[in-house]
Amino acid sequence: MFAARMQASVLARVPRRQLTLHPSINLIQPPTRRSLPRRFVSTSPTPTADPSLPPQPSFLRHAATVLSLGIVFTSLGIAMAAAPAVPVVNELLNPPTDEESLTMFVPETDHQREVEDFIQNHPLTQEMRAKPEFSEARPHLKIPPAYRNYNLTGGTLMGPGRLEVPPIIFAEAGGKSLVSISYLGDELCGHPGIIHGGLLATLLDEGLARCCFAALPQKIGMTANLNINYRSPALAGSYVVLRATTTKVEGRKAWVTGRLETLVNEGETPKVLAEADALFVMPKQAALMTNVYPTT
């Protein structure tokens, strides 16, 4: 009882605070609800396809159309890119004949015309043309023009100041022997006024190889061995004759001997410039190589 009275007296002494309530505040607020996303549903009827409009293509049909157009335009692009190569391929598959090659060279300078006339009318030329077992040709002109810039004797070394005119070659049937007439210009020198020995080696290598081509099964061979003995200096601005003879043929191998000498008039003795003997071997893939450019 005493404790209860003491607590009551203490509470009576504590000043009371008056709380003011704002009229706009509700003491009791209703519980809030989480707002849910609202979905609007159309009550209008679903539109139907217009029967007058064409049906939309399926995805597979659209993909097939795009693929077909890609193939067509790709083929056209390849055809346009390959068009310039068609004449070259045609020339490779259908090279000029020996007779046609003799009419393909047209001199461009007065000096070329002079050299050409001298060779065409020389007694040696007339003598070789009278031998029925020999055929006359200018094989370097059988190389397609697009390939000549990549050929040493048929392009790089050919022209004014160098091999002035394409050599005229007389080849005996069966690859037995060969005679070639050339003119060496003044831009082929090693020492001043003297033709470079490397050029003479090139002429011998090519001339001896061309001699035996017809004796090999696929009419082509690669140099396996070449031995050269130089006898006299070859002067710039001179006519030379290459003579070659096939001495032996065994399967894919052919042995050839030959020489370079000066072109002289009747009754004069030519000067031997260089002598050579060589071994040529027909490669196993020779059937494909004969399509690169003609060798005879």
Image (tube, helix red, strand yellow):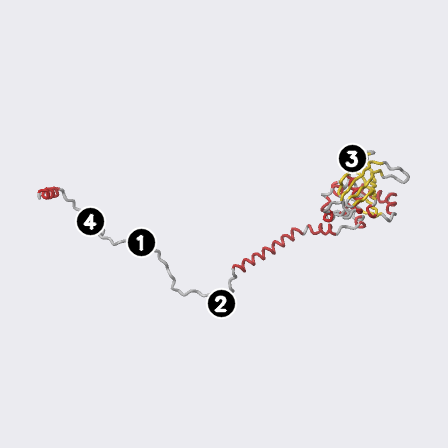
Residue, disc 3? 197
Q: Residue lying furthest top in this view?
A: 191
Q: Amino acid at mark 4?
A: Leu
User: Mark 1 and 2 residues: CB-CB less than 8 Å, in contact?
Assistant: no
Q: Count the labels in the image.
A: 4
Q: Mark 4 or mark 1: which comes first in sequence?
A: 4
Which residue appears at 42% of the width and 64% of the height?
Answer: 46
Q: Amino acid at mark 1?
A: Arg
Residue, disc 2? 51
Residue, disc 1? 34
At numbered mark 1, what does the secondary structure look like: helix, strand or loop?
A: loop
Q: Amino acid at mark 3?
A: Gly
Q: For this view, does 16 lie left or right of residue 176?
A: left
Q: Mark 1 or mark 2: which comes first in sequence?
A: 1
Residue 75 position, x and y percent, is: 62, 54
In whole angstroms, how far apart are the C-alphas of marks 1 and 2?
A: 47 Å
Q: For this view, does 119 lie left or right of residue 222?
A: right
Count neighbours of disc 2 (C-alpha within 10 A) and say few if under 14, some if 14 to 19, many if 20 or more. few
Residue 93 position, x and y percent, is: 73, 51
At numbered mark 3, what does the secondary structure look like: helix, strand or loop?
A: helix
Foreground tag (1 vs 2): 1
At numbered mark 4, what does the secondary structure look like: helix, strand or loop?
A: loop
Residue, disc 4? 21
In whole angstroms, how far apart are the C-alphas of marks 4 and 3?
A: 125 Å
Residue 25 position, x and y percent, is: 23, 51
Instruction: Judge whether 79 appears above or below 197 on screen.
Output: below
At numbered mark 2, what does the secondary structure look like: helix, strand or loop?
A: loop
Q: Mark 4 or mark 3: which comes first in sequence?
A: 4
In whole angstroms, how far apart are the C-alphas of marks 2 and 3?
A: 90 Å
